[in-house]
């Protein structure tokens, strides 16, 4: 099956409902184990990437990630293109509820061109690598003013076999209340759709922004690789 087929075959009404409720939603399988290993193996080919980020150096946690160049591997480009039209109605619905602009056109290439015109011209697709003791601090992503409110992470290794620990974490900052946290262990080849920064939350005055942070718990053993699909480019 192609990435288009696997993305189209997800239960999108259920995913949209879970995103509304929690700000994140796990998908079914997207990639085969073989394809996952092929993508992970790209990490050693530095020509594929525009830059490498040492997380400890920037106090982001511990570990390393690399941003792909615009010359994306075919499967990465196909996955990203397949997800965009499925996520677009959810993004527009969230914007309407919050009374915000919804500047995203139907076509992903047109949206990326608008990002470039606004000075956001660097690829934001990420391949992340964690080893024993590595972790990712809770954070909200900032790439520039041209922002798509949802992104996807895909697990490339097998939990419990290739690594232990390393759960995906999300924390919802609730107004006048303590924060609510969650952790997700993704099977190999499965994805998680999650909010880039906020989700709409119902209140007595209508809808308001619900800020959310995401991160990764400490990897206890082994090696953990994930693919990050982002639907805007970076400044």
Image (cartoon, rainbow, N blue to C red):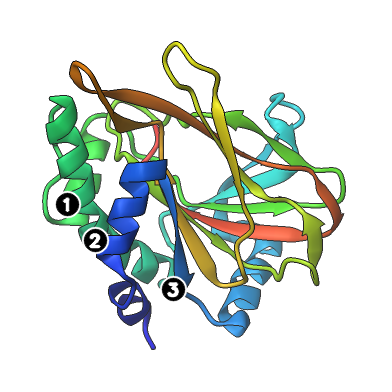
Residue 49 or 172: which is nearer the viewer?
172
Task: Where is residue 185? Give x, y as percent.
Answer: 64, 58
Q: Quadrant of the C terminus?
A: top left
Mark 2 and mark 1 in contact (Cβ < 8 Å)?
yes
Q: Disc 3 and disc 1: Cα gap in Å?
A: 23 Å
Q: Which mark is residue 107?
A: none
- Residue at the image point whose x is 32% and y is 39% from the top: 149
- Residue at the image point whose x is 44% and y is 63% from the top: 72
Does 83 sit left or right of 127 as displayed?
Answer: left
Residue 130 or 7: which is nearer the viewer?
7
Mark 3 and mark 2 in contact (Cβ < 8 Å)?
no
Q: Is residue 190 visible?
A: yes
Nearer to us: label 3 or label 1: 1
Q: Quadrant of the N terminus?
A: bottom left
Residue at which label 1 appears: 89
The residue tagged with tag 3: helix, strand or loop? helix
The residue tagged with tag 1: helix, strand or loop? helix
Task: Where is residue 20? Give x, y as percent.
Answer: 31, 44
Q: Is residue 231 visible?
A: no
- Residue at the image point whose x is 19% and y is 46% from the top: 111
Q: Disc 2 and disc 3: Cα gap in Å?
A: 17 Å
Name above or below for residue 167 compared with residue 93.
below
Residue at which label 2 appears: 86
Residue 125 or 223: which is nearer the viewer?
223
Q: Disc 1 and disc 2: Cα gap in Å?
A: 7 Å
Task: Where is residue 6? Give x, y as percent.
Answer: 37, 78
Residue at which label 3 appears: 75
Question: Image quarter for residue 195?
Answer: top left
């Amino acid at each position: 099956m192609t990435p288009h087929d696997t993305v189209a075959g997800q239960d999108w009404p259920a995913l949209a409902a879970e995103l509304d409720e929690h700000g994140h939603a796990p998908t079914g399988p997207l990639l085969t184990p073989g394809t996952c290993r092929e993508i992970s193996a790209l990490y050693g080919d530095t020509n594929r990437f525009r830059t490498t980020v040492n997380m400890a150096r920037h106090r982001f946690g511990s570990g390393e990630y690399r941003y792909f160049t615009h010359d994306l591997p075919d499967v990465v480009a196909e996955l990203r293109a397949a997800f965009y039209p499925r996520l677009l109605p959810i993004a527009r619905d969230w914007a309407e509820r919050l009374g915000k602009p919804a500047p995203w056109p139907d076509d992903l290439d047109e949206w990326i061109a608008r990002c470039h015109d606004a000075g956001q011209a660097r690829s934001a697709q990420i391949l992340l690598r964690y080893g024993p003791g590595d972790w990712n601090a809770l954070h909200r992503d900032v790439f520039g003013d041209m922002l798509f409110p949802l992104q996807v992470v895909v697990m490339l290794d097998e939990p419990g076999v290739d690594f232990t620990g390393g759960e995906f974490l999300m924390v919802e900052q609730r107004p006048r209340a303590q924060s609510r946290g969650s952790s997700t262990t993704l099977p190999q080849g499965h994805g998680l759709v999650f909010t880039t920064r906020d989700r709409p939350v119902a209140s007595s005055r209508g809808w308001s922004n619900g800020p959310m942070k995401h991160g990764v718990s400490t990897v206890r053993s082994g090696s953990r690789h994930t693919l990050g699909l982002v639907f805007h480019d970076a400044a």
